[in-house]
Image: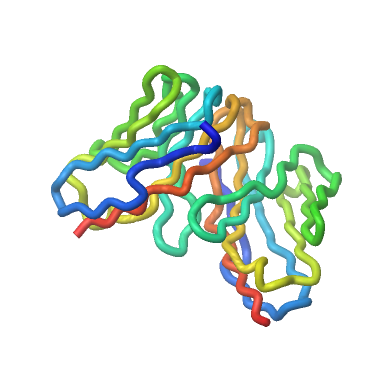
């Protein structure tokens, strides 16, 4: 059965800290891995990863995929209170996209 | 439309009643997905559509749940004889197509509360 597992499930840090969120996957006919940020209700897109070893960056956020070990990490440097959210990792094949349990990040001032 | 639209945004119902949740995807998006999110949890896959067809219904929790899509656009998720454990946020998403390399755009969800 396909699955996506995220860790840690929750994390509390202080502003300025660097965090690493983990995502492992087992998906038949893997096509991509996606990261989303959910602050209120609608998750918003962060990254799509399809190839190993190529880092995607957007400001203080970056992500990389390892297709041999079947995992991805999302890094956030110099965290801010506005980074507080649930971070969702999803993986899919040619059809459905399944998500992990999410990591709840709280950044304290 | 400009984004994925879901209605109602909130629904309170009594146990045993039927409910219908609506999703209006981004215009031109052929793929549509339904997810359920319980409090503090991740997204539980329910069903996806490619056009009007649902190739994978494996995530529907029971035969009380059904979904349809007409005209390749609007979709409705119907829950019959609601139970308290059905209380959750139901999220809809759409993408230009399936194929596994398209990002999903999410609606703001329907918060369902079953009393």
x and y, in percent, of residue A74 in the image: 73, 58
Q: How many callouts does the rendering have? A: 0
Front residue of B26 and A66: B26
Q: Residue at 85% across / 44% down in the picture? A: A54
Q: In which image quadrant can residue A50 be found? A: top right
Residue A81 x %, y %: 66, 73
- Is residue A46 found left or right of B71 in the rendered image? right
Name the residue at 62% across, 55% down.
Answer: A37
Residue at the image point whose x is 60% and y is 27% from the top: B96
Residue A62 appears in which quarter of the rendering?
bottom right
The colour scheme applied to this rendered structure is rainbow
Snapshot quadrant of residue A19 = bottom right
Question: Taking A25 as reference, is A96 above or below it?
Answer: above
Q: Is residue B96 above or below residue A27?
A: above
Residue depicted at 35% across the width and 53% down the height: B111
Which residue extends farthest top? Answer: B71
Residue B44, how many percent across, how many down?
45, 48
- Is residue B6 shown above or below A60? above
Q: Position of residue A34 (x, y in %)?
A: 66, 45
Which quadrant is the C terminus of chain B positioned in?
A: bottom left
């Amino acid at each position: 059965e396909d699955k996506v597992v995220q860790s840690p499930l929750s994390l509390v840090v202080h502003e300025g800290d660097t965090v690493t969120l983990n995502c492992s996957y087992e998906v038949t006919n893997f096509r991509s891995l996606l990261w989303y940020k959910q602050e209120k209700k609608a998750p918003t897109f962060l990254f799509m990863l399809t190839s190993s070893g190529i880092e995607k960056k957007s400001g203080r956020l970056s992500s990389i995929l390892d297709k041999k070990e079947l995992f991805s990490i999302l890094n956030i440097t110099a965290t801010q209170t506005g980074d507080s959210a649930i971070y969702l990792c999803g993986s899919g094949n040619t059809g459905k996209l399944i998500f992990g349990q999410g990591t709840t990040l709280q950044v304290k001032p | 439309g400009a984004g994925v639209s879901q209605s109602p945004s909130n629904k309170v119902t009594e146990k045993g009643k039927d409910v219908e949740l609506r999703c209006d995807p981004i215009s031109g998006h052929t793929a549509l997905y339904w997810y359920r999110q319980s409090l503090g949890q991740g997204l539980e896959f329910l069903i996806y559509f490619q056009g009007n067809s649902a190739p994978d219904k494996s995530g529907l929790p029971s035969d009380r749940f059904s979904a349809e899509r007409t005209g390749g656009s609007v979709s409705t998720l119907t829950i019959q004889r609601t139970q308290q454990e059905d209380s959750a946020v139901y999220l809809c998403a759409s993408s230009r197509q399936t194929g596994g390399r398209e990002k999903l755009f999410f609606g703001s969800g329907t918060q369902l509360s079953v009393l």
